[in-house]
Amino acid sequence: MNQTLLVELQTEELPPKALVKLGAAFAAGIANGLKARDFLEADSVVTTYATPRRLAVSITNVRDTSPDKAIREKVLPVTVALDKEGNPSAPLAKKLAALGFPDLTIDQLERAPDGKTESFFYTYTAAGSALTGALQDVLQDAVNKLPIPKLMSYQRPNGDTVQFVRPVHRLLALHGEQVLPLTLLGLTAGRETAGHRFLSHGGAITIAHADQYANTLETEGKVITSPQARKDSIRAQLLEQAGADQVLMPESLLDEVAALVEWPVVYECRFEEEFLAVPQECLILTMQTNQKYFALTDADGKLRSRFLIVSNIATDDPSAIVGGNERVVRPRLSDAKFFFEQDKKKTLESRLPALSNVVYHNKLGSQAERSERVTKLAMYIATRLGFDASLAERGARLSKADLLTDMVGEFPELQGIMGTYYARHDGEHDEVARAASEHYQPRFAGDTLPTTDTGLAVALADKLETLVGIWAIGLQPTGEKDPFALRRHALGIMRMLVEKRLPLELSDMLRDAVTTFADQPAFKDPSAEVTAFMLDRLRGLLRDRGFSPNEVEAVLAQNPDRVDDVVQRLEAVQAFAALPEAASLAAANKRITNILKKNEEALAQAGAVDPALLQDQAEKDLAAAVTRVQPAVDAAFAAGDFAGTLKTLAELREPVDAFFNDVMVMADDIALRNNRLALLASLHGMMNRVADISKLAT
C-alpha cells in the first residue's frame, strides 16, 4: 500500500551555516536511494525539513513493497557453455549453480546474439523487497554521505561511542501511521519527536501520521519545520517592523538566521546616536557579522540608530530580550568607534613604509613592491587615456595603505572602503580618496565599475599587475581552482574596457605591466597567455549579453587588440546576418579564407591585382565591384559605422557568386592564378574589416 514516508533525526543544535546543505543532502539521499530501488511513483513529492534541532524528509506515495521485476541474466557464451559435441559443459553447470539455478536445463535457456558472439540467457522474476529493509540501507547510506563540516564523537547512554555532526536524540520513521523499526546511531525509530526547546509544552510530541508532521510540530511544538517558510516569515516581520525605513537583509544573513531559530520573532532595538559618527559600513558589518542583526537606513541610505533582531522566543514582554541585545552590541560598536578614532591619528601616507613588512607573495615581494608596480602602471594607463597622471600616481600609491589600519585588521571586508574615509580625512583629492575603494571594483559579477578617471586607471593597473605577476609564477587557474581570482580580474578588465569605451590596446597595457616586473629575477613574460585568457572571459561576457557564439567568434576570432568597440561590431554583425545576402557572402568568405590559407606562399609573390591579367568576365566584374565598393567601405569604417561597412558588402553578392561559378582560381597559368589570388585577398581584406564573417557560415 502506498503511503507518505517520514524520516526525522532529532538532534542537538546543528551548525547554522551548514543546515540548509545538510537538510537538502539528507532528503536527496533518501529520495534518490528509494527511487533507485523502485519504491517511488512518478508523482511522488519530496519535501525537505530542517531546523536547528532536526533533519527530516517526507515523501508522498511511497510503496510498502517494490514491484516484482523481470531480470534477464547472461549465463555464458555458447562456445563456453557447450562442449565440442554440443552438450552442456562443466563450466555451464558451475555457472548455473553460482546463479542459484542448479536445476535449469539447456532447453530452458535463451540463445541469443551477444555482440559478435552468441550467449545463453535466463529470464526470471525477482520478487519485490519490503520498504523497511530497503530503507534501512538507504538511511545509513544517506547519513554516511552527508556533507558534515566536522564529525562529533559522543556516547550513547549504553556507553557506545557514535559519530555525527551533533548528538542525535531521537529517530522517527513513519510510513503512513505505521512505525518502521529502523536503527541508526544506536537509536531505534519511533513516532516521537521534540518541539521548541522553550515554547513547547516540554514533553515528547507524538506524530500520529506522516502527513501530519509539519502541522503537528507547528501547532503543538511551536516549530516551523520548513527553512524557506521560516525565512519568509523573518523577511515579512523585518519589513513590517522597519516601517518607512529600509532594512538591510542580505540573503546570506537571512539564511543563517533562519537556521538559528525554530519559531522566529522580530524585535526592535536601539543604540546610542553617538555611534553614527563612525562610518556606517563599519557599524553595519559588525552588526551583521558578529551579532546577526539587521541594520536599518532611511530612504536616502543613511544608517538609523535602531536595528532589528530575530529571536527564538515569543513573549508579550520582550524588554529583557531587547535590553540584552542592546547591551551586547554596545561593546562592538564601541570597538568600531575606537578603531576609527585611533586610525585617524595617522595619515595613510605615514603607513606606506610599513607595507614593506607585509608579504604579498614570496616570489613577487612585499606589498610595498607591489604598490610600486601598480603605481607605475596606473600612471602609464592614465597617460595613454589622457587622464591626470599625478592623481593616478597618488591614488595608486595610497590604495593599499588602509590594509595596515586597525579597522581593516578587524574587518578585512572593509579594505578600500576605509581607505576612502581616511584619505578624505587626510585632505586628499576626492578622486584619490575614491580610488581607494573604486580600484577594487568590480568586486563580483554585476558589481558597479569605477566612476572616476583615477579609479579606472588604478583599478585597471591593480588587476593587470595581479594577472601578469601571478600568471608569470605559474599560478594560473586550473579547473575549478582560482585562488587569486584571476578570472574575476580578467573579466573586470574586459568590462571596464568595453563598458567605459576605453581606447586602450591590450598589447600596450600588458607590455607596460611586464616592464614593472623588470627587477624580478627570471621573469617570464606571460602576455600571450594572459591575452588569450582575457579574450576568453570576454567571450563569456558577450554571450551572457545575448550574442550568439557565431557572432561573438566572428568579432573575436581575429584576436582584436582593442575591445572598446566590440559591442558595436557585434551589433553590426547581427544586422548584417539578418540581410538576405549574408549567408551567401559568409559562405564565400569561408571559401576564400580556405583558399588563401592553402596558398600563402604563392600569395606572398602575387602583389597587386593586374587589370591586364583579368580574362573572364566574372573576374572583371568582381574586380570592378571591389574597386567601386572600396571607398564606401573605407569611409564607413573610418567613421565607426560598422553596420554601414557590412551593409555595403551586400552589393558584392552577385559578382562574388558569379566569380566562383565561372572562374577557376587555381589556373595552370601561374601569373593568372596569382592575380586571381590577389583579387581574392583584396576582397577578403575588405570583407573582414569589421569581423570575420566566415564565422557566420553554418
Image (cartoon, rainbow, N blue to C red):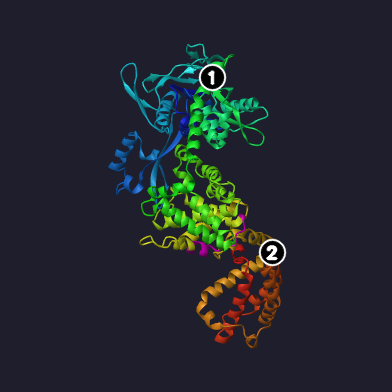
Residue type at mark 2 is Ala
Residue 323, which numbered label?
1
Spatial distance from mark 1 to mark 2, Cα to Cα?
67 Å
What residue lies at 32% left-to-right and 39% top-to-bottom? 95
SS class, disc 1: helix
Q: Position of residue 5 (x, y in %)?
A: 50, 23
Task: Work out whether residue 37 can be spotted.
Answer: no
Question: Magenta region: which residues?
Answer: 499-511
Q: Position of residue 458 (x, y in %)?
A: 53, 54
Q: Is residue 370 above or below residue 622?
A: above
Q: Is residue 663 left or right of residue 288?
A: right
Q: Position of residue 154 (x, y in %)?
A: 34, 23
Residue type at mark 1 is Gly
Q: Is residue 646 above or below residue 471?
A: below
Q: Is residue 367 above or below residue 686?
A: above
Q: Quadrant of residue 664?
A: bottom right
* Furthest residue in direction bottom, as rendered: 612
Task: Work out whether residue 151 can be spotted.
Answer: yes
> Which quadrant does the C terminus fall into?
bottom right
Instruction: Check disc 2 and report the residue beneath it.
Output: 643
What residue lies at 50% left-to-right and 31% top-to-bottom? 20
* Furthest residue in direction left, as rendered: 90
Sequence order check: which comes first, mark 1 or mark 2?
1
